[in-house]
Image (cartoon, rainbow, N blue to C red):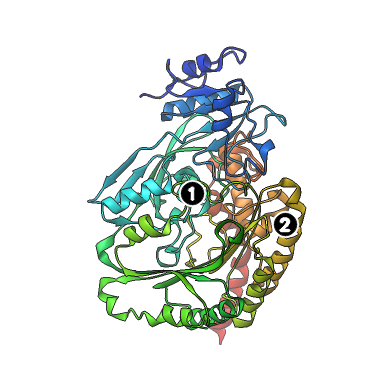
Amino acid sequence: VGPPPPATEMVVCSDPIEDSLAKLGGGTFFGQVIIPENTTQYTEAVKQYGSVTYFDRSKPSFVAVIQTESDVQAAVRYAKQCTYGVAIRSGGHSYLAVSSCNSDDSPCMQIDVGEMKKLDVDTTTNQIIAGPGNRLDNLADKLHEHGLFMPTGECAKVGVGGHMQTGGFGLWTRHFGTFLESVSGFRIVLADGSVQDVQTPSDSTSRLNDDLFYAVLGGASGSWGVVTEITLNAVKDDAYFSAFWQVQLVWNADGAENMFRKWAQVAAAHEQDARWSTHWTVVGAQPAMGVNYIELEASWVAPLAQAGDYDPSFFQDILDACTNCAVLKRVNVTEAMSASLANRYLCCRDGPEFPAPFRYYEKSFQQASQFPDGDKTAAIVSKIDTFLPNENSTFLFVFQLTTAFKPRDGATRALPFPGDKIGIVCDFFFPDPRMAPIFKEWKADFTAVAVENLGEDHQTFWGAYDDPDLATMWAQFYESEDKYETLKDIKACVDPENLFTHLMSMPVGEVAEREFKDAPSAASARAISAWTSVAPFLLWFGSLQLRR
């Protein structure tokens, strides 16, 4: 399908939307328009993870279900001409419910790319070309089919389009980096309806290319344009030795504390060894499953030449520290990484992550740059124990702690806090929204304990919750004001009218678009500015050294 006609093609905003989209799409709109009057279709189309808790954030003026890139261009140009804000949905897994929008505030459209599911594999280059509508489970299955692997998160129904913009943290991140670090390029429709084919920055790429690559990969998802295609780099399964553990134990507070203390010792002793990784989950499921349990998922991955270094006692010693803990499940295998990902690690392939009637939730999230010691992990475990439900409770509780963080190069991708090594997630699921104040209080209590013992309260976009305001809370989402201001400048270049906007989208900076495009890339310009400010001092200091 060829590109739509130039953006000078105008429509009458009161005309039927599909007619206007067809006009802006070169005569044909291959997708579908769903309006609120299409009650059943509309309800399903706007549904997202956060819809129940934040039902007022899923009320767009209409939904444009996309089939082709030209559909996206037509929808964006229509939004620009008819003054609609744009929210973008690939899998609808936003905890904040920002993959839709609220037309009560202002006219807005939801662009749904969930049907864009191209998935081509080149086993010669180990590259995958993926549409943004693919879910992690069908990506994992395709990788396994071809003997390839890349790190992802654990939730099977997350859309690739959002995942590649917010990180993609999971068990194998400590070995290979986040999911978005597997991205080597993407196609994106910008606010003016143009398409940019963005590649990994090099000496031959443009300033706009480099700034888009930087901003889209971790800057603030849904702020820059509509991603229509992603190029991903995989690794070959058979180039690595891989061990995978998955052990579930009936919850025992003393045993769990002992395990976490042992884990803290092991983590500290082997902090620089990226071949091991752990993912802890505590599930307070007694009301639904009749038991509360703790799960340790662990991996040890190395090039084949290092396979002889693997020592299973590394993980067994941690498990042995859980005294009097009954085993519910035990998996300990050496197999292809793609098999462990597709068949064991991904959760919730067949349904939501929380069963009915536990539809409402409260969430907290913290990241930190250091592993907590044994006493600090014990304090966190003690607080977890106070939250676990009993047989008479009417809620579920899930706690996760992952060491799956690998120090990253923040020069080409804007993903925040590249040096962080640990993340903690706490979820409460409950059946009645009137119970929310109880869990908000519990969440605040837990967050205080977590922050006190981690020493930091770093946030990420995928874990954002409640009512965050990026303009006032940027220091929790970015490690420096310079990074935040750089991203605002890029926003001013590619979306000066703030077409792509939601609760956590990037504010527009003050840099004029024409001046910005004629200048070095935003990141480069700020680096030059920083060098200019310190250069006189360095020259003076150097002259002193020469005199000595």
Provide residue 153's location: percent of width, then percent of height. 47, 56
Residue neighbourhood size for the residue with mark 1, other residues' Cα within 10 Å, grouped as few (<14), some (14–19), many (≥20):
many
Judging by the rendered image, the residue that carries numbered circle 1 is 163
Query: Which residue is at 53% across, 30% downward?
Result: 192
Q: Disc 1 and disc 2: Cα gap in Å? A: 28 Å
* Left or right position of 504 against 10: right
Q: Are marks 1 and 2 in contact (CB under 8 Å)?
A: no
Residue 243, by quadrant, is bottom left
Query: Which residue is at 42% across, 30% downward?
Result: 69
The residue type indicated by label 1 comes to: His
Mark 1 or 2, nearer chain start: 1
Pick the residue in front: 204 or 88: 88
Pick the residue in front: 203 or 440: 440
Tell me the tag on residue 439. 2
**Is the N terminus in the top left, top right, bottom left or bottom right quadrant?**
top left
The residue type indicated by label 2 comes to: Phe
Query: Which residue is at 58% across, 60% downward?
Result: 285
Q: Secondary structure at mark 1?
A: helix
Q: Mark 1 vs mark 2: give the one in front.
A: 2
Residue neighbourhood size for the residue with mark 2, other residues' Cα within 10 Å, grouped as few (<14), some (14–19), many (≥20):
some
In the figure, 200 relative to 80: above or below?
below
| Residue 198 in view here | no
